[in-house]
Amino acid sequence: MFKHIRSIKKIVAVSAFLFLLLSNLSAQDAAAGKAVFSANCASCHKMDKDLTGPALMQADKRWNDDKALHQWIKNWKKEVATGNAYANKIKDWAPTEMNIFEGLPDGDIDNVIAYIKSYVPPVAVPTKRK
Ligand code: HEC
């Protein structure tokens, strides 16, 4: 009986450890992704405002397909060529073309996606009613 309780305790402890490890890892991915974003994307994109490119906040939800989103970021022309409907729609958003990032490591692209997913817009202070 006590033996069982001990093994249940062990399972709970190991699960809690793995959960903490994984949630901490995704926070690290998002932080690394923010650096990748600043270095490669911020000249055209902001998270919460349209610039040369569209605001990237919630882009993961608009795509609803991490593989397609990954391929778009790496080389948007290849994603357009797959016939993906959303890619074919967003490609005409601006007269400017997005850069090709074939040289960016896949891990960096995944980290940028983690950053987009983790992004929470700043809380707006209500302006005075007129
Ligand atoms: C030279 C400017 C430029 C740079 C640099 C750039 N983009 Fe873009 N991006 C665009 C434009 C413009 C679009 C809209 C598509 C179009 O009109 O061609 C776009 C579209 C996107 C979209 C689709 C947006 C949506 O709402 O679904 C994502 C995601 C994206 N870019 C991510 C990135 C990431 C990540 C980087 C950096 C690794 C990056 N972009 C760098 C210009 C840029």
Image (tube, rainbow, N blue to C red):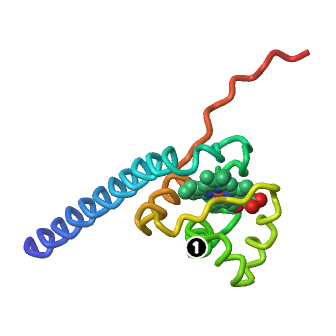
Q: Name, please, the residue furthest toward the right.
A: 130
Residue plotted at (46% across, 63% down)? 104
Q: Quadrant of residue 4?
A: bottom left
Residue with the mark numbered 1: 71
The answer to whether mark 1 is within 8 Å of ligand 1 is no
Q: Can residue 81 be seen in this view?
A: yes
Vertical relation: 81 (above or below) 15: below
Q: What amino acid is found at the position of numbered circle 1 in the picture?
A: Gln
Residue 83 percent location from the top left of the image: 74, 83
Horizontal side of 16 relative to 3 (left or right) equals right
Indicate whether 42 appears above or below 79: above
Residue under the image location 21 percent in, 70 percent down = 11
In x, y percent, where is residue 33?
A: 45, 52
Q: Quadrant of the C terminus?
A: top right
Q: How crowded is mark 1: few (under 14 residues within 10 Å), some or many (20 or more)?
A: some
Q: Which quadrant would residue 88 be assigned to in this image?
A: bottom right
Residue displayed at 60% across by 71% down: 75
SS class, disc 1 = helix
Q: Quadrant of residue 78?
A: bottom right
19 left or right, relative to 17: right
Give coordinates of residue 38: x percent, y percent: 50, 44
Quadrant of the image where one finds ligand 1: bottom right
Please state which of residues 115 and 15 is positioned toward the viewer in this rendering: 115
Q: Is residue 44 above or below residue 96?
A: above
Horizontally, is 15 left or right of 64 in the view?
left
Name which residue lies at 63% across and 31% down. 123
- The N terminus lies in quadrant: bottom left
Q: Outermost residue toward the left?
A: 3
